[in-house]
Amino acid sequence: MKAHFAQVVEAIRDILEFQSAEQLTEDTLLETDLGMDSGLMLELIMQLEDSVEGLVIDQASISYEEFKSVGSVCDYIAARVQIAEPA
């Protein structure tokens, strides 16, 4: 399981008001499988910024591929949080 998987799943569950998010995997596609549109993606970004310490997402610089699936969001967060933390 990827780093930040639980945080991403929890954020998606909150936004989409799932009772359970057990069906979500790293391969779950946000747009295709979950029907997330740009408004819901914006909510996801804000929720993740609030729940992941040190994460700041520049909405103008993210790509579709970075927010295509649960796993790609986990990878995006892991890369950004690692960069943000002092060495």
Image (cartoon, grey):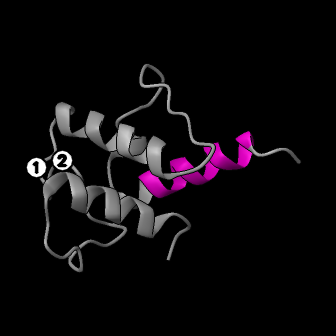
- In the image, residue 86 sits, relative to residue 72, either above or below, namely above
Report the side of 31 relative to 48 (left or right): left
- Tag 2, which secondary structure? loop
Name the residue at 20% across, 32% down: 38
Q: Badges 1 and 2: C-beta atoms under 8 Å apart?
A: yes
Quarter where residue 10 is shown: bottom left
- In the image, residue 58 sits, relative to residue 37, either above or below, namely above
Name the residue at 57% across, 42% down: 55
Answer whether residue 76 is magenta in the image. yes
At label 2, counting other C-alpha atoms closer than 10 Å, the crowd grade (few under 14, some 14-19, many 20 or more) is some
Name the residue at 43% across, 70% down: 6
Residue labelled with disc 1 = 35
- Tag 1, which secondary structure? loop
Q: Residue furthest front?
A: 50
Report the side of 38 relative to 68 (left or right): left
* Residue 4 picture location, percent across and down: 51, 63
Separation of marks 1 and 2 at Cα, in angstroms: 5 Å
- In the image, residue 8 sits, relative to residue 59, either above or below, namely below
Q: Residue furthest right?
A: 87
> Tag 1: residue type?
Gly
Q: Which mark is residue 31?
A: 2
Q: Residue furthest top?
A: 60
* Residue 85 picture location, percent across and down: 76, 46
* Residue 7 picture location, percent across and down: 43, 62
Q: Main secondary structure of the magenta part?
A: helix
Report the side of 87 relative to 43 (left or right): right
- Range covered by the magenta-colored residues: 73-84
Report the side of 50 relative to 16 (left or right): right
At label 1, counting other C-alpha atoms closer than 10 Å, the crowd grade (few under 14, some 14-19, many 20 or more) is few
Name the residue at 32% across, 47% down: 68
Answer whether residue 7 is magenta in the image. no
> Tag 2: residue type?
Glu
